[in-house]
Image: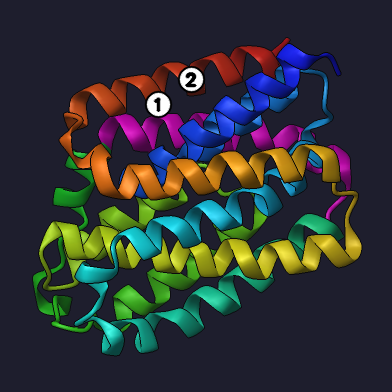
Amino acid sequence: MVWWEWLAILMAGVAAGGINALVGSGTLVTFSTLVALGVSPFTANVTNTVGLVSGSVASSVGYRRELSTQRPRMRRFVPASILGGLTGAALLLVLPESAFDTIVPVLVGLGVVLVALQPMIARRLAVPHDTHALGGPVAWIAVYLVGIYGGYFGAAQGVLLIAILGALVDAHLQRVNALKNVLAAVVNAIAAVVFILLAPVDWGIAVVLIAGSTVGGYLGAHYGRRLPDTVLRGFIVVVGLIALVVLLR
């Protein structure tokens, strides 16, 4: 790769870290960037997962105030995310790469739809009898299923978590977002460990993404709340559509 391609990867990592801290779906930015630069979808996915873990951790640190009173919720949901991440990563490795090439455009398309319709999805997912200060059984199962999705691909994992937790957990949205960052970090970290051991990670790209996503995640948690949701949502949708075009060529 030439210098501008490495710079593009670094900037994509910064953008993804910031977007993940705020809403989720930063994976759409980095994944589409890597694919556009000629990296195979499978390698882009596993490298992306490894490269964005530090950004998720940094965003969780940035939201530490909102997390300070949520230890019971974390104890409830982290096991679901661990199991989901392991399941999703195993599916990625067990299924043939051709299956991934077929499924990924569908997942990216789903991610774009979820980002665009997230407010409506959150309202439709509301289940009053399951709303609970810590989160009821429906929420636990939903977090596990999102963990599978995140371990396999991850685009819009954060959006799904916000929609589910926002509807099923009795908490302020900023606290829900902080919890989302922790659970996404757990899923990504578990999947990353599996991929480091068993999958073809491109370490040059991964290191650049780690640097970029760490900066982006921390800055996103601190300053990105000022960005209007509609602007951020529109940006992610545009990036996702670009990714679809690249994948379907």
In the picture, the quarter occupied by the N terminus is top right
Left of 179 or right of it: where is 239?
right
* For the residues bearing labels 1 and 2, Cβ distance under 8 angstroms: yes
Q: Residues within 10 Å of mark 2 (few under 14, many from 20)?
A: some
Q: Can residue 189 be seen in this view?
A: yes
Q: Quadrant of residue 187?
A: bottom right
**Mark 2 residue element:** helix
Disc 1 secondary structure class: helix
Residue at 67 percent of width and 48 percent of height: 51
Is residue 144 magenta-colored?
no
- Residue type at tag 2: Val
Give me the residue at 14% from left, 50% from top. 123
> Gap in Å between the C-alphas at discs 1 and 2?
5 Å
Which residue carries the number 2 mark? 239
Residue 32 in the image, given as x and y percentages of width and height: 63, 25
Residue 236's label in the rendered image is 1
Main secondary structure found in the magenta portion: helix
Which segment did they paint magenta? 95-117
156 or 181: nearer the viewer? 181
Q: Position of residue 137 (x, y in %)?
A: 31, 84
User: In the rendered view of the protein, which quadrant contains the C terminus?
Assistant: top right
Instruction: Classify residue 195 as left or right of residue 147.
Output: right
Which quarter of the picture shows residue 108?
top right
- Residue 129: assigned label: none
